[in-house]
């Protein structure tokens, strides 16, 4: 396998140095990368649909000859329209593309073309709007016609036909050199084909069953290797001696009495779970899931207080300064009076003046701070927390494995609690956070207002602004959220900066307006949001920087423009900013969805406020990779397996991984010799905490 990883893609006939750059755009640098560039779907071209049998409203694959083509400007919005008419002798179909004038040089009358898309009837003729297309050379149909044909992700300057040819050439020359990571006994136990047969059948299967068996085998391998790395990491940490905290029933009761509110049953349950973990000699590794506003911070505070009562230090790390300051202020309020008032709490964030940063760091090092709350600044080399025994990482999906390990390294195997307001179904928890025990806060505290969610089309935006003005005149505050900072002509979106100027000078000129977005300096954004919190601003125009932003009980109105462009969980997070006081709120979604997924997201966000239901729906719509984004260390490395759809394979692979690790934690046995190297290559960083023998 190493040999293939070290053999450049340029040595396959037909590639060379120039086209190697194109492959680099697809993440393909070597032969192994090429083998693992799997199709995103397949087309069964062994039995093409004749044009006379095409059914309107369904996605189908058709083939024929280009009869004629034309280009024009549409009357509406002046778009460039390119049309071709295709015939196969039994009928005709028109294919239409917008704003792609270069297609005139691609299609030629008489050329053979394959189209894939949804057929519709328009003006008594059959047509496809923006179908996928492919020109087929009549003498080169072996890989491209009369069989199940792979459809790959492409980059500009590359065609499906060319990519298939290169992959076929690579398989012919190098497939025999591919080494199997899975031992024979394991493949036989679960009836899995070998690696060479699997790779061949994922690219060029003879039938659907061969493709499914190959995918099952490759998914098992990926889950198996990933789970070994996750389990190894957990085992290497929990086997080290941690801090055995003393926790009494009286301590728990005193903590509850200190609070100005009553804990929910879910909060009490999770505090009990954390209490039990902290009394063990092995370090706690726990994930706390809870919807927006469910009260995770107070649960985390219990662990911090427990560390303080045991003469130790605690740390809370948040992804933004706004969130860090919010935690700092709310915790200060909770411990202001009573027995916890002696707990020394401080803030450490990147925007602090150098002298103040050094002062806080020095106090931490001397043990003069019991609880530090901060951002990535806590991970700086100059920051030491010698008696750290409890670490909290808020918004886990914003951090990776390395950051978690770095914070842990500040003390001697502290208990770690990672929190997320992004609900994760059990399947993904198992995949991503298999090294963590999971706690769930599945109820909201009483006294939160209800939030009504309403959808309006773009042409009714002025009416929505009118409703917002009425609410602002009553002394309340509001947010207006945009997906972009600057105008994008290509996407035809209203953007935050553009609309901010228009609001200030025209639509909302009677009100005090602020703007905050991710490209501003931290100090500027902090200043604007602080003003909004103090009600020195009535309206805050923002981008998704607000997703894990401020808590303003007086702001119970939110407008989300171009809502169809936001992820479902993102919409839920944003909406969670309002209705946090006792008042009811309203969330206006302004959207013109043009895709089924966009429509599905809007329907889901209107129908429920349950974060776990929304998370499940979001996963169904977008898939796990997009759900977590590229920064989430773990899902990004799952190249082809899908934990949501392959739970049976995942659980099987995890079971085998557990047995392997329990027998050989450091993967030094001969039968496991190759596993460590492969895991280090595929999941970099996941074995950093595994101690050698």
Image (tube, rainbow, N blue to C red):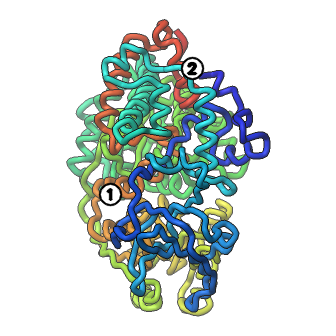
Q: Secondary structure at mark 2?
A: helix
Crowd band around label 2 with a 10 angstrom C-alpha radius: few (<14), some (14–19), many (20+): few
Mark yes or no: residue 157 visible.
yes
Q: Residue at x 20, y 48 (%)?
A: 265
x and y percentages locating residue 384 in the rendered image: 61, 31
User: At which x and y percent is residue 656?
Assistant: 34, 21
Q: How many marks?
A: 2
Work out whether 562 lies above or below 218.
below
Residue occupied by mark 1: 617
Q: Is residue 622 left or right of residue 512?
A: left
Q: Are marks 1 and 2 in contact (CB under 8 Å)?
A: no
Which residue was labeled with disc 2? 677
Where is 190 relative to 537, above or below? Answer: above
Q: Position of residue 413 (x, y in %)?
A: 48, 24
For residue 514, say whether it is visible.
no
Quadrant (top left, top right, bottom left, bottom right) of the N terminus: top right
The one nearer the camera, 114 or 633, is 114
Residue at position x 33%, y 44% in the image: 645
Q: Quadrant of residue 659?
A: top left
Residue 153 is left or right of residue 579, and the answer is: right
Q: Secondary structure at mark 1?
A: helix
Question: From the viewer's perspective, is residue 466 above or below residue 526?
Answer: below
Badge 1 or badge 2: first in the primary sequence: 1
| Residue that extends furthest to the right in the rendered view of this protein | 17
In the shown orientation, is residue 406 left or right of residue 233? right
- Image x and y of residue 394, in percent: 46, 46
Image position of 35 with respect to 585: above or below: above
Residue most toward the top? 670
What residue is at 23 percent from the left and 33 percent from the top?
A: 249
| Corner quadrant of residue 279 | top left
Front residue (pair 222, 613): 222
Q: Residue 585 versus residue 670: which sits nearer the camera?
A: 670
């Amino acid at each position: 396998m190493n040999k293939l990883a070290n053999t450049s893609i340029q040595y396959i006939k037909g590639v060379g140095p120039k086209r190697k750059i194109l492959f680099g755009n697809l993440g393909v640098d070597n032969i192994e990368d090429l083998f693992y560039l799997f199709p995103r779907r397949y087309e069964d071209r062994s039995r093409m649909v004749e044009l006379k049998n095409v059914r309107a409203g369904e996605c189908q694959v058709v083939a024929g000859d280009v009869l004629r083509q034309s280009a024009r400007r549409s009357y509406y919005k002046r778009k460039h329209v390119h049309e071709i008419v295709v015939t196969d002798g039994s009928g005709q179909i028109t294919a239409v593309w917008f704003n792609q004038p270069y297609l005139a040089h691609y299609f030629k009358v008489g050329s053979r073309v394959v189209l894939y898309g949804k057929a519709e009837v328009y003006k008594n003729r059959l047509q496809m709007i923006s179908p996928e297309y492919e020109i087929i050379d009549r003498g080169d149909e072996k890989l491209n016609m009369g069989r199940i044909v792979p459809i790959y992700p492409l980059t500009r300057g590359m065609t499906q036909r060319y990519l298939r040819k290169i992959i076929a050439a690579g398989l012919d020359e190098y497939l025999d050199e591919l080494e199997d990571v899975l031992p024979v006994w394991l493949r036989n136990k679960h009836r899995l084909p070998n690696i060479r047969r699997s790779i061949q059948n994922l690219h060029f299967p003879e039938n659907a069953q061969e493709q499914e068996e190959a995918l099952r085998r490759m998914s098992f391998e990926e889950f198996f290797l990933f789970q070994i790395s996750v389990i190894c990491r957990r085992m290497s940490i929990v086997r080290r001696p941690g801090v055995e905290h003393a926790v009494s029933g009286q301590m728990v009761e005193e903590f509850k009495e200190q609070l100005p509110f009553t804990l929910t049953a879910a909060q009490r349950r999770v505090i009990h779970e954390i209490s039990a973990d902290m009394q063990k000699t092995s370090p706690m590794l726990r994930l706390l899931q809870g919807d927006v506003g469910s009260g995770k911070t107070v649960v985390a505070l219990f662990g911090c207080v427990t560390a303080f009562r045991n003469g130790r230090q605690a740390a809370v790390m948040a992804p933004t300064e706004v969130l860090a300051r919010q935690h700092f202020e709310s915790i200060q309020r909770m411990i202001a009076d009573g027995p916890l008032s002696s707990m020394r709490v401080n803030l450490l964030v990147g925007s602090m003046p150098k002298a103040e940063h050094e002062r806080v760091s020095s106090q931490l090092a001397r043990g003069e701070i019991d609880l530090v709350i901060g951002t990535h600044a806590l991970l700086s080399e100059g920051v030491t927390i010698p008696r750290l025994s409890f670490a909290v990482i808020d918004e886990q999906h914003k951090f990776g494995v390395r950051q978690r390990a770095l914070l842990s390294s500040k003390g001697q195997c502290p208990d770690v609690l990672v929190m997320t307001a992004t609900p994760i179904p059990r399947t993904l928890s198992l995949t991503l956070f298999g090294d963590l025990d999971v706690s769930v806060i599945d109820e909201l505290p009483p006294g939160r207002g209800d939030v009504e969610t309403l959808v309006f089309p773009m042409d009714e935006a002025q009416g929505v602004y009118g409703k917002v003005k009425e609410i602002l005149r009553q002394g309340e505050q509001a947010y207006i959220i945009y997906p972009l900072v600057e105008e994008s002509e290509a996407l035809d979106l209203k953007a935050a900066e553009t609309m901010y100027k228009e609001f200030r000078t025209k639509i909302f000129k009677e009100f005090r307006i602020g703007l905050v977005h991710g490209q501003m300096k931290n100090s500027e954004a902090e200043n604007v949001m602080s003003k909004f919190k103090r009600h020195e601003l009535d309206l805050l125009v923002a981008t998704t920087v607000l997703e894990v932003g401020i808590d303003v009980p007086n702001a119970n109105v939110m407008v989300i423009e171009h809502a169809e462009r936001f992820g479902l969980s993102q919409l839920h997070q944003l909406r969670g900013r309002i209705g946090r006081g006792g008042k009811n709120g309203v969330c206006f979604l302004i959207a013109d969805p043009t895709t089924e997924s966009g429509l599905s997201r809007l329907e889901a966000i209107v129908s429920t406020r349950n974060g776990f239901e929304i998370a499940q729906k979001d996963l169904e719509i977008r898939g796990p990779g997009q759900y977590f984004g590229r920064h989430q260390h773990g899902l990004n490395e799952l190249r082809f397996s899908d934990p949501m759809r392959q739970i049976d394979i995942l659980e099987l692979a995890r079971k085998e991984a557990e047995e392997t690790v329990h027998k050989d934690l450091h993967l030094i046995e001969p039968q496991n010799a190759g596993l460590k190297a492969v895991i280090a290559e595929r999941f970099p960083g996941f074995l950093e905490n595994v101690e050698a023998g």
